[in-house]
Amino acid sequence: MSAAPTETVHAAPGRRGVVVGPVGLAWRPRVFWYTVAALATALLLVVLGVAIGSTWITPVTVVRSLLGLETGPDAFIVENLRLPRVLTGALVGLTLGVAGALTQTFTRNPLGTPDIIGVTSGASVGAVAAIVLGGGTYSVSAIVLGGGIPIAATIGALIAAVAVYGLGWRGGVQSYRLVLVGIGVSATLDAVTSYLLVRAKITAAAAASQWLVGSLSSTSWTTVWPLLVVAAIAVPLALATSAALGIGQLGDEVATGVGLAVQRHRLVVIALAVVLTAAAVAAAGPVGFVAFVVPQIGLRLAGTNRPPLLLAGALGAVLVLAADLLARSAFPWQVPVGIVTTVVGAPYLIWLLVRHRKEMSR
């Protein structure tokens, strides 16, 4: 009996890969090293974020406390007062960065982020409704066991995503139609949020208004754990869709031709983006422009044709941690982190729109 024929696969020039059983993964050193650098920067910002506050704690003491080698007042401050806030910021940035990379790749449009296409607004409506109906409690820690804000935010984000996808469908989904529909849905949902605030009691409206800015001031360990669980499950699932996302970039016809179930893949991507966005919004409110900015930064750093998911998540953690550190230390009063990220992201959005307009006019 003759041996079974074998097939030799030649890698493209300049492209290396890693083969694990039937799975082949492209090896891009540039993406890998930028991701490592972003993760290292995020870790450094975690230490600095814990160290800096009304009472300065040396980074050595912070590290010893994190390793369980320190006791006393400094260890209590690190473990119970500052670390939950810093970890929440890192996880919010991670989840929003990955969600933004998913939606931008899915729509093949840099404007196709949860902020723009209505997912964040939907999550905000659900969460504000939970806050108002719950009597003004905006901290996840107070009602997480009852499923309040996280469940309400997820439902709101899911309804918004279904509405945008359904209204944008015309024998298929084009990215610009999806963005335009998303802007309209987002404006409608923002109006619903405003109505809820107007009809709410003063205490509930004040609590919801503070939360809507995007703040890490009310976080605790009970804020961290739900977000950590979502990130631990949804981020690896998102990374598992990376190959299909690359195929989807080629267009629906080509993707279908090579065996990709396009509609099922899109539903999976939307579901993951909704869950990641809702978890972040439930924990810290709608921290603006993170999901929009960091995937584009990652795209330009990596030099790829789409935002690398893990790099975008790592850069999201860096942005939120840096913004929170700036908000706590550069002003005589604490500024909500969402204000800082909006100040950074809004000019970038204007620049991107102007650049696209110039390209379209050529």
Image: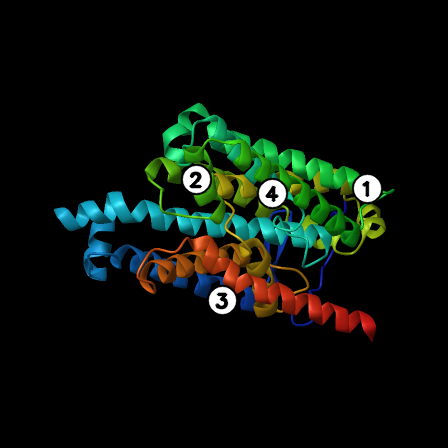
* Mark 1 or 4, closer to the camera: 4
Can you tell which quarter of the image residue 36 is in?
Answer: bottom left
Please, what secondary structure does the residue beneath circle 4 have? helix
Mark 2 or mark 4, which has the lower sequence index? 4
Q: Residue furthest bottom?
A: 362
Q: Residues within 10 Å of mark 1 (few under 14, many from 20)?
A: some
User: Circle 4 sits on which residue?
Assistant: 121
Distance CA(mark 3)–CA(mark 1): 39 Å
Image coordinates for residue 68, horizontal then vertical, percent? 20, 46
User: Circle 2 sits on which residue?
Assistant: 206
Identify the amino acid type marked 4. Ser
Mark 3 or mark 2, which has the lower sequence index? 3
Identify the amino acid type marked 3. Trp
**Above/below status of 238 relative to 362:** above
Residue contact at pointers 2 and 1, CB within 8 angstroms? no
Identify the amino acid type marked 1. Trp
* Mark 2 or 4, closer to the camera: 2
Distance CA(mark 2)–CA(mark 4): 18 Å
Distance CA(mark 3)–CA(mark 2): 44 Å
User: Circle 1 sits on which residue?
Assistant: 169
Please, what secondary structure does the residue beneath circle 2 have? helix
Q: Is residue 69 visible?
A: no
